[in-house]
Amino acid sequence: MKSAVLEKIDAPLVIGNVELTDLSFGQVLVKVLVSGICGAQLQEIAGYKNNAAFVPHLLGHEGCGIVENVGIGVTKVKKGDKVIMHWRKGDGIESDFPTYIYKGKKIRSGKVTTFSEYSIASENRLTPVPQNTPEDLCALLGCGLSTALGTINDEAQVKFGESVMIIGAGGLGINLIVAATLASAYPIISIDINDNKKKLAETLGAHLYINCKKEKIQESIQKKFGIQDIDVIIDTSGNKKSLEGTIQFLSGTGRYILVGQPRPGESIELHNANHFFLGEGKSLKATQGGKFSPSKDIPRYVRLSKAGILKVDGIITHRMKLEDINKAIDLVRAGQASRILIIM
Ligand SMILES: [Zn+2]
């Protein structure tokens, strides 16, 4: 089968022939239909996840597929089921790390992998969905959209009419706009450094889009909405300057949530940190996937989408083939794309 292999840190992925191995206890063979690309894979490629020792390695952690075969012990899914592939743990067996053969040697993947035609996944990284669930929605619910919904609803606990500022209008930032809209946040402010994200951000529900290279954030917000501070700020960029430059905008009950991760070893400074004690006490939190709980959350998100309440149109900006995955990764890295779907 064809897979995109991380052979070397900080180098393009290699599209190579990878052989499957026999399924072990709790493992499931999935024919991958589509995969998303997430910031986490960019970090793995850069070697920011302490992963240099594991290369060559297989990547990808949000996708949709069809179950081809199940290993001993698997009861949650059966052959023919449509499944969402996710990195967060759901119900079911936590299997050993899947192994594959590449260039005659054994290589590993995470407990799920999606940049491949087929994937061996741990039972608890798969959640079955009705057959008519759209593949786009399934892939988005594997990580980006579910992380966004969990971050807004669970981590930030956004109340109706609270102001939400989302830094970065990439794959995750766009999903966060959708989630904040669902929570009736107002205003929703999207910040990025590219003008080309403006239209999509506004279409999906942002009430103001600020290119922070050209406009001053606080002045723009004050001018349009007459408010000084923000209830919830979510950073998807992982850029230390972004946190240092915006944390003082938090309201007295404000919550600052980090979804993007700073580089390993990097320090962040809280300037004039005294403001953190104004009001009821502000909070700063790093989230792990918005506390997304696949077995509990995916069924209700799929129902919301079927009812037309959760709308995902427009989130996916590009569809590309596995052969073109390096081009897709370059687009994400350059801030030129929102969510890209790899079609297997
Ligand atoms: Zn992800």
Image: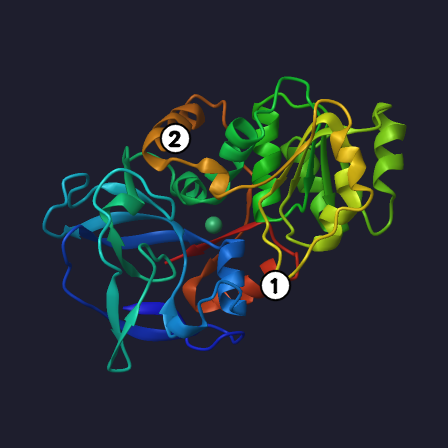
Left or right position of 119 against 49: left
Q: Quarter holding the C terminus?
A: bottom left
Neighbour class for label 1 at 10 Å: few (<14), some, many (≥20)? few
Colour approach in the figure:
rainbow
Residue 25 on image: x %, y %:
14, 54
Left or right position of 41 against 332: left
Residue 301 on image: x %, y %:
42, 29
Is the Cβ of the residue at disc 2 closer than 8 Å to that at disc 1?
Answer: no
Relative to 203, say whether 70 is above or below: below
Q: Which mark is residue 265?
A: 1
Q: Which mark is residue 139?
A: none
Q: How many marks?
A: 2
Which residue shows up at 43% across the image and 24% down it?
304
Query: Of residues 213 and 54, which is closer to you in this image?
Result: 54
Neighbour class for label 2 at 10 Å: few (<14), some, many (≥20)? some
Residue 289 on image: x %, y %:
48, 42
Q: CA distance from mark 2 to mark 1?
A: 34 Å
Q: Is mark 1 within 8 Å of ligand 1?
A: no
Looking at the image, which residue sits at the far left?
72
User: Disc 2 residue type?
Assistant: Asp
Q: Does dot 1 land on a helix, a strand or a loop?
A: loop
Which residue shows up at 87% across the image and 43% down it?
216
Left or right position of 270 against 157: right
Q: Does dot 2 land on a helix, a strand or a loop?
A: helix
Give the residue number, with chain letter if any, for mark 2.
Answer: 297
Query: Of residues 112 and 253, which is closer to you in this image?
Result: 253
